[in-house]
């Protein structure tokens, strides 16, 4: 990989700190330049001390994806499945896609958080924040598309497919440095989470219903795997909840109902397994959304009540029996 020589450290540090602003202020077509910068920065490593190197590198990549979305998103998506990258590089690619998607769609992740909660969120992983926010801001307006906070225009809609489809196209590619369904389940979970965020950012786009159907087909592949990491289970539930909330009723009935019902059955089965309290709460939430969207009341009142009273939990491997609420539900159903 490329390295930053200590001899030129000061000059290069100034350049890295200046690049994000220059990219943000760029006028006209900068696709070729943004792609060239992305190719260099993605594999760049620092050989001297630069306190904000990681932040600057990430900011540059995000800005490249914002100013040249089609070109850079396509490049990053295909690089995600190349053999010459580490797990860290792949997670960086997914983080860049998430951040660029939000910026282009002008979504505010937590517009009403007070300072105490913001401080607490600094110690959380990006996907944990996303799940926590969605769980806290549950709404019963499931039959309409999610309203996107936009500025003068939503620049994401025309390019949302570039941030989405290529990330799924090669998931089964055999790689020496990546095995999504075995030792690299963290990457699989983050991949599914990323696709859910991209779909959420595109929820008002004409392409959103087809994207939702494609995402359901994708995650359903992994529900057939008997042993799944808790993180992957949570990501599947999160992504399915996004699909259910952004899909128009007509599309829900005609095109994705069978897939949704398959995942619904899988989510119900999760509640009978020994899973963490976090996964259980998210499964209840996802089932509640799916039942509301398809107009079915298949839940016992106590589970609906639990969903409405949901309080975000810290991520830890706590089985169902250690959660008093879940234990009470399990005993009442038996």
Image (cartoon, rainbow, N blue to C red):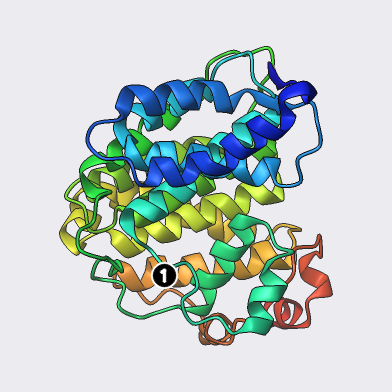
Percent position (x, y) of residue 8? 71, 24
Percent position (x, y) of residue 111? 46, 76
Residue 159 occupies which quadrant of the picture?
top left
Percent position (x, y) of residue 70? 30, 32
Asked if one can make out residue 312 in the rendered structure from this viewpoint, the answer is no
* Point 20% across, 63% down: residue: 152
Left or right: 260 as drawn, with respect to 204: right
Percent position (x, y) of residue 245? 34, 64
- 323 or 28, which lies in front? 28
Pointer 1 residue: 289
* Point 50% across, 37% down: residue: 61
* Point 44% across, 53% down: residue: 197
> Is 44 situated above or below 240?
above
Residue 275 occupies which quadrant of the picture?
bottom right
Left or right: 238 as drawn, with respect to 86: left
- 283 or 122, which lies in front? 122
- 184 or 70, which lies in front? 70
* Point 55% across, 16% down: residue: 82
Left or right: 234 as drawn, with respect to 246: right
Say which quadrant the C terminus sits in: bottom right
- 290 or 93, which lies in front? 93
């Amino acid at each position: 990989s490329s390295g930053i020589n200590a001899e030129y450290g000061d000059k290069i540090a100034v350049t890295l700190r200046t690049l994000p602003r220059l990219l943000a202020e760029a006028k006209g077509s900068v696709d070729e330049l943004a792609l060239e910068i992305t190719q260099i920065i993605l594999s760049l490593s620092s050989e001297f001390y630069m306190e904000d190197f990681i932040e600057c590198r990430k900011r540059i990549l995000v800005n490249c994806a914002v100013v040249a979305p089609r070109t850079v998103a396509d490049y990053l998506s295909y690089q995600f499945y190349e053999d010459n990258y580490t797990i860290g590089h792949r997670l960086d690619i997914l983080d860049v896609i998430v951040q660029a998607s939000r910026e282009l769609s002008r979504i505010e992740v937590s517009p009403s958080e007070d300072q105490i909660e913001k401080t607490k969120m600094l110690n959380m992983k990006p996907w944990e924040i996303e799940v926590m926010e969605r769980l806290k801001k549950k709404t019963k307006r499931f039959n309409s598309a999610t309203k996107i906070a936009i500025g003068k225009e939503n620049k994401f809609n025309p390019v949302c497919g570039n941030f989405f489809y290529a990330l799924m196209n090669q998931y089964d590619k055999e790689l020496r440095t990546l095995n999504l369904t075995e030792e690299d389940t963290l990457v699989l979970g983050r991949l599914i989470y990323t696709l859910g965020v991209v779909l959420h950012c595109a929820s008002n786009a004409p392409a959103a219903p087809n994207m939702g159907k494609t995402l359901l087909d994708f995650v359903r592949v992994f529900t057939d795997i008997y042993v799944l990491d808790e993180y992957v289970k949570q990501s599947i539930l999160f992504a399915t909840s996004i699909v259910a909330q952004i899909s128009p009723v007509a599309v829900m009935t005609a095109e994705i109902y069978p897939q949704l019902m398959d995942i619904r059955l899988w989510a119900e089965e999760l509640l009978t397994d020994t899973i963490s309290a976090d996964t259980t709460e998210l499964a209840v939430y996802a089932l509640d959304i799916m039942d509301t969207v398809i107009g079915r009341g298949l839940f016992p009142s106590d589970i609906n009540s639990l969903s409405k009273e949901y309080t975000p939990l810290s991520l830890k491997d706590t089985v169902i029996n250690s959660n008093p609420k879940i234990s009470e539900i399990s005993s009442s159903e038996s």
